[in-house]
Amino acid sequence: MRDIPSLSRIIRPKNNSPPIGELLEHHFTNVSFQILNYIPTKINHMARIVHESNSGFLPAGIHTVKVTSIEDAENTIDPNKPTFQIHLQSTEEIDGQFRTARFWTSPVLHSKGKLKPFSEAVLGRNLTPEETRNGFDVDTLIGKQVCVVIRDAVSKTGNQYAKVVDFLPVKQS
């Protein structure tokens, strides 16, 4: 029977952080770990069943969601430009839970941006010229429903994520 390697050799924090021993010395909390190359070395052990992560985010497809919040957010590309982060939650359970999505947009009503098409889909109508010119209170969208189109995407760093790509009005029955 082989010796079991120390945990600091088989467990590494995500995102190239220092080895676990260094993290524990600093008493970090809420740290996510991923297990690399775990090889069971004893025959008499309990099975360690590993499942795909259930992130709680909406899977690819078209979903009816409720607008849960619209918040000011930090623009990581240009800190001088204001940005909204919009949070959405599925109106029906998917695999036993309500799933979420979020997207970022500039607070400008332009047809090539996300805020105008999003607002029009939530309202179920085009914005009036007065609303486009003078603006409107986006907080009135909170609590309302909209359909979103989600597609799987891959970031520049290779991470997979769910991307909100389009908005559709909810069909009235």
Image: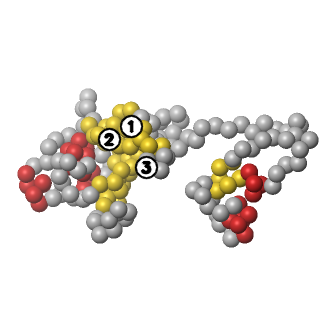
Tag 2, which secondary structure?
Answer: strand
Picture quarter with the N terminus: top right
User: Left or right: where does residue 125 sit relative to residue 38?
Assistant: left
The amino acid type found where label 2 is placed reads Val
User: Left or right: where does residue 32 sit relative to residue 42?
Assistant: left
**Of callouts 1 and 3, which one flags the residue occurring earlier in the amino acid sequence?**
1
**Of callouts 1 and 2, which one flags the residue occurring earlier in the amino acid sequence?**
1
Q: Residue at x 7, y 51 (%)?
A: 129
- The disc label shown at residue 165, or none: 2
- The disc label shown at residue 4, or none: none
Q: CA distance from mark 1 to mark 3?
A: 16 Å
Residue 12, percent across and down?
A: 67, 55
Q: How many marks?
A: 3
Q: CA distance from mark 3 to mark 2?
A: 17 Å
Picture quarter with the C terminus: top left
Q: CA distance from mark 1 to mark 2?
A: 7 Å
Q: What residue occupies the far right of the structure in this picture? A: 1
Identify residue for label 1. Answer: 151
Tell me which corner region of the image, top left, top right, bottom left or bottom right, holds residue 83.
Answer: bottom left
